[in-house]
Image: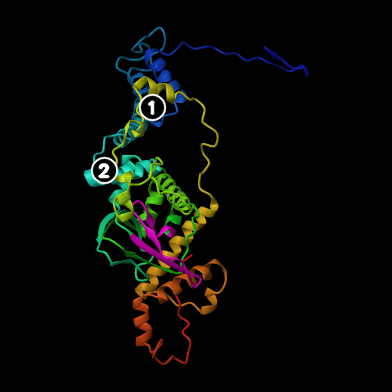
């Protein structure tokens, strides 16, 4: 009986019903477990078990105390079909998700060469075997002889390279200023501008660049499209690649210090053969005990997963807006380069390329494309360039950039 100061009286009659039988109690217990664990696999498993007991409860007529297993207040063999159907459908999603989670944890084996590359990725980025398998599936092995041109204006921005073995001489040009030639060794990446696709602005912009094999080289490379796919495929893959980009840039910066010695991922100086084109220690050295992925027992897993409340900022994105914009610009530049090289670009006026971000990307694309041998041949065929007679009318066709 509830009384208020305005002399209004409200009478509420509540009848407490009997407790649910054993199936209902077990269902609620498993749903409680799902609320106190933080590991997604444990949560899915607890939800599955909860739905199993909900199905048993509905299939036995929703028994209430004093009934224990089967309801006696209904005609014999009464089941609540709608509850069985809903619980079965919802539970099936959780069962399939558990299968996918367990599949992710399955042991993955590589051949000797791929295993050495996984060790390199694991040491420098923390990448696990599953994510490495997905990354490796999109890569291709390529070999070059000493003196071969690996990248020039013809295929700039088409591939992202990892030097597994050998030495590469790299030189770039930006705003008509050429950089000093640099030697890249085993464990180095190029062209780093494609690293912008992973969602952190790295820069390393260039109008053109060239990479030449100084020794026989064995490389692993990804196309620009594959790099973009890896950035969007799964959060873990792009996060590992961002770790790798951070390691790569910091390693290059450390090597710029006077007297600095090139080291592997644990700080041990590289072998002398590395300077002559040999493999980095991160490829060749077997994981020692301290580097092995940490494993814990079943009860340790339960204890570490016991966290009923989410950590701070769980739903927040880890990507800065500047990185997302850098990735979008890189996507557009690659797309524009492909259109220009294919000769299938639509017509836009020169004025359209003079203002804003659109114009900046377009100018870079057209400048880089104009240095390619194919473009030079076209200019010569049209009477433009060295030794030719220029057309009186300036061309207004540049390209189209879809934004």
Q: Position of residue 367 (x, y in %)?
A: 45, 74
Q: Residue shown at 34%/28% (left/top)?
A: 295
- Look at the image and give the residue range highlighted in magenta: 168-193
Q: Magenta includes 183?
A: yes
Circle on res. 42? 1
**Front position in the image: 306 or 379:** 379
Task: Please name the residue shown 36% across and 69% down the image.
Answer: 152
Res. 58 in view: no
The residue to which callout 2 is attached is: 115
Location of residue 211 (image quadrant): bottom left
Q: Toward the viewer: 137 or 145?
A: 145
> What is the quadrant of residue 335 in the picture?
bottom left
Quick check: 94 above or below 55?
below
Circle 2 or circle 1, nearest the eye: 2
Horizontally, residue 42 falls left or right of residue 403, namely left
Secondary structure at numbered mark 2: helix
Residue 140 rendering spot, x and y as whole percentages:
27, 55
Q: Can see residue 340?
A: yes
Residue 137 place in picture, x, y as percent? 28, 50
Q: Residue furthest right?
A: 6
């Amino acid at each position: 009986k509830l009384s208020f100061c305005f002399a209004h009286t409200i009478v509420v009659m509540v009848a407490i019903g009997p407790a649910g039988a054993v199936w209902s109690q077990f269902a609620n217990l498993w749903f409680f477990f799902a609320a106190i664990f933080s590991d997604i696999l444990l949560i899915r498993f607890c939800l599955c078990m909860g739905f199993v007991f909900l199905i048993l409860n509905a299939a036995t007529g929703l028994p209430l105390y004093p009934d224990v297993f089967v309801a006696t207040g209904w005609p014999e063999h009464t089941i609540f079909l709608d509850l069985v159907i809903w619980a079965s459908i919802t539970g099936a999603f959780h069962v399939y998700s558990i299968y996918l989670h367990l599949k992710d944890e399955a042991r993955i084996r590589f051949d000797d060469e791929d295993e050495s590359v996984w060790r390199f990725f694991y040491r420098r980025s923390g990448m696990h075997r599953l994510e490495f398998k997905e990354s490796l599936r999109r890569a291709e092995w390529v070999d070059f002889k000493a003196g071969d041109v690996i990248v020039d204006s013809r295929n700039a921005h088409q591939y992202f390279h990892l030097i597994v073995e050998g030495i590469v001489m790299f030189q770039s040009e930006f705003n008509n200023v050429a950089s000093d030639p640099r030697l890249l060794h085993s464990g180095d990446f190029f062209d780093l501008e494609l690293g912008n696709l992973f969602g952190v602005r790295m820069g390393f912009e260039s109008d053109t660049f060239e990479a030449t094999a100084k020794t026989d080289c064995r490389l692993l490379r990804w196309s620009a499209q594959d790099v973009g796919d890896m950035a969007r495929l799964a959060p873990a893959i792009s996060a590992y690649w961002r770790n790798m980009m951070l390691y790569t840039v910091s390693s290059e910066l450390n090597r710029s210090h006077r007297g600095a010695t090139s080291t592997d991922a644990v700080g041990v100086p590289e072998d002398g053969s590395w300077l002559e084109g040999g493999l980095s220690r991160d490829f060749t050295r077997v994981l020692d005990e301290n580097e092995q992925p940490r494993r814990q027992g079943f009860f340790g897993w339960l204890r570490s997963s016991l966290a009923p409340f989410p950590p701070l900022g769980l739903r927040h994105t880890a990507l800065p807006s500047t990185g997302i914009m850098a990735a979008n610009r890189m996507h557009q530049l690659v797309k524009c380069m492909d259109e220009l090289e294919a000769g299938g670009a639509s017509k836009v006026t020169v004025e359209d390329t003079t203002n804003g971000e659109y114009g900046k990307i377009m100018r870079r694309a057209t400048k880089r494309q104009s240095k390619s041998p194919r473009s030079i041949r076209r200019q010569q065929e049209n009477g433009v360039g060295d030794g030719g007679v220029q057309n009186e009318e300036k061309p207004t066709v540049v390209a189209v950039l879809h934004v």
